[in-house]
Amino acid sequence: MHLRVSEGWWAALGAAGMSHERWRALPRTARRAVTTGVWLAILLVLIAFFGVWKTTALALAAVVALLVVPVWTRLPYGKFVVPLAALGLAVAYPYYFGSMPQVPIFGPFPQVSTMVVMMIFTMMALGLNFVVGYAGLLDLGYVAFYAMGAYMAGWFASSQFAHQKLDFGAVGLYEGWSGFHISLWLVLLMAGIATAIVGVLIGLPTLRLRGDYLAIVTLGFGEIMPQIARNGDSLFGTGFNLTNGTNGITPIDGPGFGNWAEQHLHLPANYLNAANFDSLYLWTAIVLVLITVFCSLRLRDSRLGRAWIAIREDETAAAAMGIPLMRTKTWAYATGAFFGGVAGAYYASYKSGAFPDDFFFNISVFILCMVILGGVGNIWGVIFGACFLAYLDREGLANVGAWFSDHLHRQIDVPKYEFGIFGAILVITMLFRPEGLIPSQRRAAEFHEGVHDEPLYDAETAGA
Amino acid sequence: MATNAAPVTSIAARRTVGSYAMPAIAALLVAALVLWLVINFTKGPAYFFTISFIGLTNGAVYALVALGYTLVYGILELINFAHGDVFMLAGLFSASMIDGVFGVTTHSSTGYLVLAIVGSLLVAMVACGLINATIERIAYRPLRSAPRLAPLITAIGMSFVLEDIAIGWKGPGYTAVPDVLPKGNVFSVSGVTYTWEKFIVVLITLPVLLALIWLVQRTRQGKAMRATAQDRDAAAMMGINVNRTISFTFLIAGALAGAGGLVYALYFGQIRYDTGFQLGLIAFTAAVLGGIGNLPGAVLGALSIGFIQAYNEGLNWHAPGSNWTQSIVFSILILILVFRPEGLLGERTPEGG
């Protein structure tokens, strides 16, 4: 853990138009006065919200944490302390969130159902991070993968195809069921593989395009997929109902371990019938996120991951070093698509439906915003960005809006401006901190030194 | 790598196969399209022409927006995502001007109608030009030397901000524009009719396009734009104020979007916060189809897309219908980028025409 306080300070000064040099040039008394003023203001704000005693306790806790945290990194296995603590807090969340205090402005802590969505979006953001963060390819159509995963769940874990009858380990079947019902665990895997194949199919013709063209083509695919979903209730006039049109496919089976596992292992037979439905979905989502994080970390340090980063930094040099550009990029695409598909299928199961209106361009930008705000290419940053923005989307903005209405006595519908706020976040992040809030050091260096990534495509056409 | 051992001749042979396959597929696609059009034409020539006029009108509106994309791409190599939303704001401006400021109704005299349209056109063009130049100043200029995806991301962000400004201003529903254009026939020959409202769209679009071509090709400022597009550093060394030229380009692009917004609002009669995003993507496709950075190419591409859209939505024999318009437009975009990334007119410089 590095202390980021000083960096944040310089960023704030820079935003106020005060460069490093100009700050140094001020007399020492003036500098001290400003710093003291800032700390006093922070203290006063804290006291205003919490009262004197809580603020003192918080300040003491912060001091202790700051003193203690750096020591952990020097211990053997010390780097696992913070992630494991975060994991423990997340797993135990359903047991203690009810007794958490109100946070100023943001209101109560998020519901468990919101936590599930946060975890699912974390997984999607980590999937997009393979494409945008590691390989440096801007993908504006990530929602297509999410949609593909959701519809895979819709096809193979619901009664969509009424003329078929197939049961393969599904739970919660009722009398007179029809359609494909495959165990959701298997469907998650199938969705991931199918989506990865779609990713390869999309990638093969388009990945040799230059960065911004690739962005627009992926955007095109992101718009085509939901349109197929909307019009898919009678494809080309044949009457074949693939996607059930605008009504979407619903309901979709839940995951579960079956009756045998419930009796012998005390695992839930069917999530949908369990009393702690949301908690079960949360824990499963956390496991999925853990798998994604593991794959992200291992792939990043693998031969393939280093090839991705080389392409991101300089495509021409990477090609000259013998990295096969197309194959490496396609792998990035397929990997990102895989996790997007799994997350999509899981989300469809949680919502018990796949609806075409969920798959708009907005969602692509929403996920992109998570990756960019948190820190392009850095897993911890992406997790933070995804959790924070998904929370804002589900509860945070509404709570903030309510707070504003109460305190300013003006009715402001904050959630209405949600995507404008996300757009502003994108702009402000790119202008003032392009590497994101929690960047990877390598990526930050690229942004500040200004990599001039003239891609190979240009060179080819210029020579032709 | 393992392929190093392969003899040179085999590489040459592989290239030949590949270089025949791609044009063959492209030729097949074009042939199928032409066949479909011919069959539709023989089934009802008069109806086909009527549909074509709709296509011409659509294409005229797209051309105004596509030119903005192409101008900005030519000079900065940036896809200005916010451009479509500037266009949308222009539509809302025009709606307010015609409805609120001028108070035009269907009973207004022709002279007053012309005055109102020209007045709204000027206001929309100036306002949108300024908005576009401001966006460039705030969101793109600080990122000139950043990796090239950075300004693209701020462009997307600005696009959402503009949409929210529109939501805050007019609400999320459609804003209706009074239906003031005359509906009479310009001519009607053996079942082929051409109405005044369509003709007026072309009447507004054409002078704007001509003025733009004059500006880029005949004026000093246009020369500066072309020079900056070719080589920014060299242009700066020749004494061109590059920043001002880029600002000017954004101003012109915004003004074109302003004109497009007015025409759209008048002709289609309703506009909403996300109209610009959808239409912007279509217009961008048009710009790529024509060859991005190429001004006549953008017009050609826009007209092609306009015709394709009209035929798709209007023709009777095996037309996919309006539900599929977007998918078709994007498929065209993808096919163009795969088969002929330099576009129909084949040049990647803005001084093309």
Image: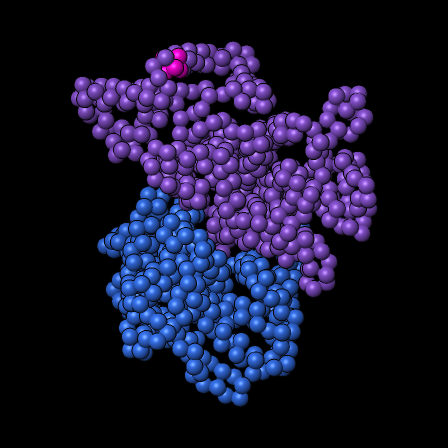
Q: Which residue is nearer to you in this view: B189 or A456?
A: B189
Residue B257 picture quarter: bottom left
Q: Which chain did the renderer colour blue?
A: B
> Which color was chain A given?
purple
Count of all numbered marks drawn on residues in the image? 0
- Left or right for B85, reference A205: left
Pick the quarter of the image with the N terminus of chain A: top left
Q: Tell me residue A420's x, y (percent).
A: 41, 45
Residue B150 in view in this figure: no
Instruction: Name which residue lies at 57% across and 28% down.
Output: A112
Q: Please provide the residue range marked out in magenta.
A: A54-58
Residue A66 sits above or below residue B194 on the image: above
Q: Tell me residue B300's x, y (percent).
A: 46, 69
Residue B237 sits above or below residue B126 on the image: above
Residue A16 picture quarter: top left
Instruction: Name which residue lies at 48% across and 32% down.
Output: A388
Q: Tell me residue A45's x, y (percent).
A: 32, 23
- Left or right for A281, reference B127: right
